[in-house]
Amino acid sequence: TIIPLYILEQYNAPFILFIPILLIMLGVSIFLTGYVQTKFQIADPSWIVIDELFGVFTMWPFLHSKQNTWAIYLLGFVLFRVLDILKPGPIGFIDRKLKNGFGVMLDDILAGLIAGLFCLLLTQLLNLT
């Protein structure tokens, strides 16, 4: 599923075309994460990183601009990781309350959304885009 995303990116396709692929990937990821949790009796397996990948995927559209520099992408990634590790506010609530595949994925998606919105706001305030 990464290959279609890469092809769409190369042709600078509108984000709306990414959504069906991401939704399929999300459904499969939720199912597989839940399966692994049940099979190995682990709440959030640290060796499963598809949730972090989805967090970055969620952040990416907010940073997708020809004017953005590598520094904005780095800031977004670092902010995402900080939010993912510290789990403040609603991210932590989801992490504590939803102990299933959906919860494992959702807390990282929310961290990516917050990081992306923060970077978008920052670039708009500083007129970087």
Image (cartoon, grey):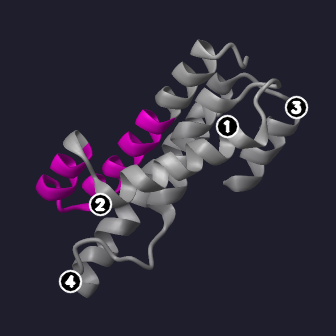
The reply to whether the C-beta atoms of the residues labelled 2 and 1 are less than 8 Å apart is no
Q: Please name whichever residue, 30 or 125, is drawn nearer the observer in this view of the structure.
A: 125
What is the crowding at mark 4: few (fewer than 14 residues within 10 Å), some, or many (at least 20)? few
Q: On the rendered structure, is 39 left or right of 58?
A: left
Magenta-drawn stretch contains 101 = yes
Q: Residue at x 41, y 34 (%)?
A: 114
Q: Is residue 17 above or below residue 34?
A: above
| Amino acid bearing label 4 | Gln
| Amino acid bearing label 2 | Gly
Q: What residue did someone put label 3 on? A: 11
Q: Please name whichever residue, 91 or 19, is drawn nearer the observer in this view of the structure.
A: 91
Real-space CA distance between mark 3 and mark 4, rounded to the nearest whole angstrom = 43 Å
Residue 76 place in picture, x, y as percent: 57, 42
* Marks 2 and 1, the one that precedes in the sequence: 1
Q: On the rendered structure, is 124 left or right of 29?
A: right
Disc on res. 55: none
Label 3: element kind:
loop
Residue 83 place in picture, x, y as percent: 38, 50
Q: Is residue 60 above or below residue 15?
A: below
In the displayed orientation, state which residue is furthest to the front.
Answer: 126
Q: What residue did someone put label 1 on? A: 72
* Marks 1 and 3, the one that precedes in the sequence: 3
Magenta stretch?
Answer: 91-115
Q: Is residue 52 visible in the rendered structure shown here? A: yes
Q: What residue did someone put label 2 on? A: 101
